[in-house]
Image (tube, rainbow, N blue to C red):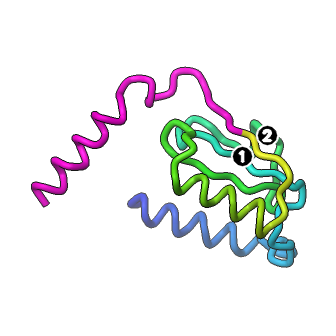
């Protein structure tokens, strides 16, 4: 089974069991947002004790307050009522091993060859 098929099957099972969660309010019930790393080893729901509807979780490489992350946090705060933000970093983050300049170079090179 391909990864796509696995994800689609998992989503179908998740949606079938979603039940009353579909009626949760749009604003996060616990009134906070988390900005954290996209590292696949981390599960914000587990390490922060979250259930669906509890908090907004914004993830990106290194848990950085990039323009897009800030945009999401502003929407969370100004439009959806969050009162607190947490920026959560972790040890052994892959972003410790390269700089923004390296990332920009990789992106520029891939655009040139596309």
Specify whether residue 65 is painted magenta. no
Of marks 2 and 1, which one's residue comes earlier in the chain? 1
The image shows residue 92, relative to residue 78, as above or below, that is above
Q: Residues within 10 Å of mark 1 (few under 14, many from 20)?
A: some
Quadrant in which residue 37 is drawn: top right
Q: Whole-percent x and y of residue 98?
A: 35, 27
The image shows residue 13, relative to residue 91, as above or below, that is below
Residue depicted at x 76% and y 45%: 85
Q: Which residue is mark 1?
A: 34
- Mark 2 vs mark 1, CA separation in Å: 9 Å
Q: Which quadrant is the C terminus positioned in?
A: bottom left
The image shows residue 48, relative to residue 76, as above or below, that is above
Q: Which residue is mark 2?
A: 48
Q: Determine the residue located farthest toward the bottom in the rendered image.
A: 23
Q: Whole-percent x and y of residue 79?
A: 77, 69
Query: Do the residues bearing badges 2 and 1 touch, measured as CB atoms within 8 Å?
Result: yes
**Range covered by the magenta-colored residues:** 87-114
| Apparent side of residue 9 relative to residue 21 in the rendered image (left or right) | left
Main SS category, magenta section? helix
Q: Which quadrant is the N terminus positioned in?
A: bottom left
Label 2, secondary structure: give it. Answer: loop
Quadrant in which residue 55 is drawn: bottom right
Q: Whole-percent x and y of residue 108?
A: 20, 49
The image shows residue 5, relative to residue 30, as above or below, that is below
Residue depicted at x 70% and y 43%: 44
Quadrant in which residue 2 is drawn: bottom left
Q: Residues within 10 Å of mark 2 (few under 14, many from 20)?
A: few
């Amino acid at each position: 089974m391909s990864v796509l098929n696995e994800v689609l099957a998992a989503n179908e099972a998740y949606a079938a069991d979603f039940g009353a969660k579909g009626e949760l309010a749009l604003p996060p019930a616990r009134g906070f947002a988390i900005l954290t790393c996209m590292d696949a080893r981390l599960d914000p729901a587990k390490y922060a004790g979250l259930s669906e509807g509890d908090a907004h979780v914004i993830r990106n490489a290194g848990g950085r307050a990039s323009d897009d992350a800030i945009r999401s946090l502003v929407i969370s705060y100004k439009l959806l009522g969050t009162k607190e933000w947490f920026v959560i970093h972790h040890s052994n983050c892959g972003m410790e091993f390269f700089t923004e300049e390296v990332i920009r170079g990789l992106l520029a090179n891939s655009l040139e060859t596309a």
